[in-house]
Image (cartoon, rainbow, N blue to C red):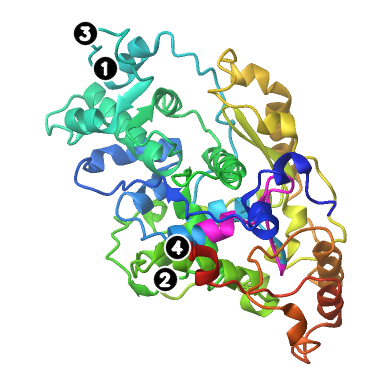
């Protein structure tokens, strides 16, 4: 299996499930509500949030976030491969791309990478400059660790509602604190759960900084997936922009897809930048319920048995009818940067550098899929970089200089070549790719609940593609495992 590296595969949840019959529990989702009454949105914040390029995203997540399904997300995460930054399925590779970031979250892609020094030596002074307050220092700092940030409780206690008579300076401080609270809980949620890290407040220090929040969010999601697919503990978790991952999954697969109940009222205040994103389609959905262990196995079986006909390859529509939706007026920011969606580029978020590899999933764009896709090493070394493991590295902007330069160059190239014509999807070429892919990766995770030989030659429908028949003959079969088999003990 040439697509799989022993470095990752030896500890990968998918391999341990498929080959060693290990049993895992669904991941905990480090997703936090941002639309509670603890931090009230003030209309006076709008003009500053708009300058940062975050207005469509903030409008989406602060009004509501859909109920997420940890069992379905985990069954998908088990198929993530850090080697290719894609999910490995019976239907080929699929992944979250910059297109999805634009359509679902409408975060800006073009701009300066979110990469700077994380040195927290003078953070209290800088925090006071930005929001006009700092948490109290414990009486005995040697006994109680002073967090490099502030707890969400503290932020809510001091900035829950901006005074009506606030000065312009105070108004900016409340806006900054509000954004710090929201992005720390929705875009960059981590394992702490209680504290908003200082670095995300520092990222908000310039109202006109023109940062690439979209590429940073996708880099952070990729890094969370890289780590979560190799986590084994019963309380293992995953963070990052899980709204993005959830909506992407629901748009492409029926596995774990909730029922849309209704759309909540949306007031765009006659501002196109406050119109809803594609994520609004999932505004109010049915709540996940059921036995988590059982549902996790059921979803794993469903992904094992997935066929190409069950995948919505282009949920935003074909090229000639792209992004058309009857129910509401889509935010123009969702499609504004479409010329950047197929960049093969480094995605940068502070210490994390993750490669965007759309050439591996061209069917998601309705385009021709090469066999094999052009290889790009996702780099074991940069995957290992972490602010906790490499505490001596502070100036990430300098450390990642070559990736930042490459990002800037590739954005410039994409801006100068907006009318690139690519070959459209070809079914025969795709099945050639699929035949190759199935021989190079692992796509089934559940152990069989029966002797496969009893099914003989009748496991595939007569109308299946010949290439899939051949893949089946090489051992890539649909194997269903049972709840009782895994959890009887």
Residue nearest the observer in this picture, 320 or 239? 239
Closer to the eye: label 4 or 2: 4
Where's residue 257, x and y in %?
47, 70
Secondary element under disc 2, as helix, strand or loop, is loop
Closer to the eye: label 3 or 4: 4
In the figure, residue 373 lies in which quadrant?
bottom right
Residue matched to label 3: 139
Sequence-first tag of 4 and 2: 2
On screen, residue 79 versus residue 299, left or right, reads: right
Mark number, residue 447 = none
In three-dimensional space, the C-alpha distance between marks 1 and 3, rounded to whole angstroms, equals 15 Å
What is the crowding at mark 4: few (fewer than 14 residues within 10 Å), some, or many (at least 20)? Answer: some
Sequence-first tag of 3 and 2: 3
Sequence-first tag of 3 and 4: 3
Circles 2 and 1: CB distance less than 8 Å?
no
Residue matched to label 2: 258
Image quadrant holding the N terminus, namely bottom right
Residue matched to label 1: 134
In three-dimensional space, the C-alpha distance between marks 1 and 4, rounded to whole angstroms, equals 43 Å
Sequence-first tag of 1 and 3: 1
Secondary element under disc 1, as helix, strand or loop, is loop
On screen, residue 334 versus residue 306, left or right, reads: left
Circles 4 and 2: CB distance less than 8 Å?
no
Circles 3 and 2: CB distance less than 8 Å?
no
On screen, residue 134 versus residue 420, left or right, reads: left
Closer to the eye: label 3 or 2: 3
Circles 1 and 3: CB distance less than 8 Å?
no
Closer to the eye: label 1 or 4: 4
Q: Which residues are magenta?
A: 74-91
């Amino acid at each position: 299996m040439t697509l799989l590296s022993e470095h990752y595969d030896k500890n990968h949840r998918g391999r341990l499930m498929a080959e060693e019959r290990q049993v895992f529990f669904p991941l905990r989702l480090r997703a936090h509500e941002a639309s509670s009454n603890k931090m009230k949105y003030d209309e006076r914040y709008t003009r500053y949030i708009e300058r940062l390029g975050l207005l469509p995203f903030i409008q989406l997540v602060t009004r509501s976030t859909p109920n997420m399904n940890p069992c379905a997300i985990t069954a998908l995460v088990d198929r993530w491969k850090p080697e290719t930054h894609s999910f490995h399925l019976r239907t080929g590779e699929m992944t979250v791309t910059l297109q999805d970031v634009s359509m679902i979250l409408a975060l800006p892609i073009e701009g300066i990478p979110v990469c700077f020094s994380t040195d927290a030596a003078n953070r209290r002074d800088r925090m006071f400059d930005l929001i006009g307050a700092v948490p109290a220092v414990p009486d005995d700092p040697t006994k109680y660790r002073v967090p490099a940030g502030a707890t969400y409780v503290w932020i809510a206690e001091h900035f829950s509602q901006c005074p009506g008579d606030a000065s312009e300076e105070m108004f900016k401080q409340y806006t900054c604190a509000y954004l710090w609270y929201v992005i720390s809980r929705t875009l960059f949620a981590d394992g702490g759960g209680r504290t908003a890290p200082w670095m995300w407040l520092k990222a908000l220090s310039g109202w006109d900084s023109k940062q690439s929040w979209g590429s940073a969010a996708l880099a952070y999601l990729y890094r969370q997936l890289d780590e979560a697919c190799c986590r084994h503990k019963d309380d293992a978790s995953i963070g990052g922009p899980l709204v993005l991952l959830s909506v992407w999954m629901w748009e492409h697969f029926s596995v774990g897809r909730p029922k849309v109940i209704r759309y909540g009222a949306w007031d765009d205040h006659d501002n196109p930048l406050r119109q809803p994103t594609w994520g609004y389609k999932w505004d109010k959905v049915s709540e996940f319920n059921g036995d988590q262990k059982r549902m996790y196995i059921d979803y794993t079986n469903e992904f094992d048995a997935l066929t190409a006909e069950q995948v919505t390859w282009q949920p935003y529509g074909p090229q000639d009818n792209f992004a058309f939706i009857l129910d509401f007026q889509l935010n123009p920011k969702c499609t504004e940067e479409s010329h950047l969606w197929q960049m093969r580029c480094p995605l940068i978020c502070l210490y994390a550098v993750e490669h965007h590899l759309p050439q591996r999933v061209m069917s998601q764009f309705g385009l021709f899929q090469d066999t094999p896709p052009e290889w790009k090493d996702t780099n074991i070394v940069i995957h290992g970089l972490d602010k906790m493991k490499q505490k001596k590295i502070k100036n990430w902007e300098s450390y990642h200089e070559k990736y930042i330069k490459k990002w800037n160059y590739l954005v410039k190239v994409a801006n100068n070549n907006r009318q690139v014509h690519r070959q459209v999807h070809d079914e025969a070429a795709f099945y050639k790719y699929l035949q190759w892919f199935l021989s190079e990766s692992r796509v089934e995770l559940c152990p069989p609940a029966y002797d496969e030989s009893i099914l003989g030659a009748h496991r595939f429908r007569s109308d299946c593609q010949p290439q899939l028949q051949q893949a089946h003959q090489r051992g890539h079969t649909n194997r269903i495992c049972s709840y009782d088999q895994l959890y009887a003990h």
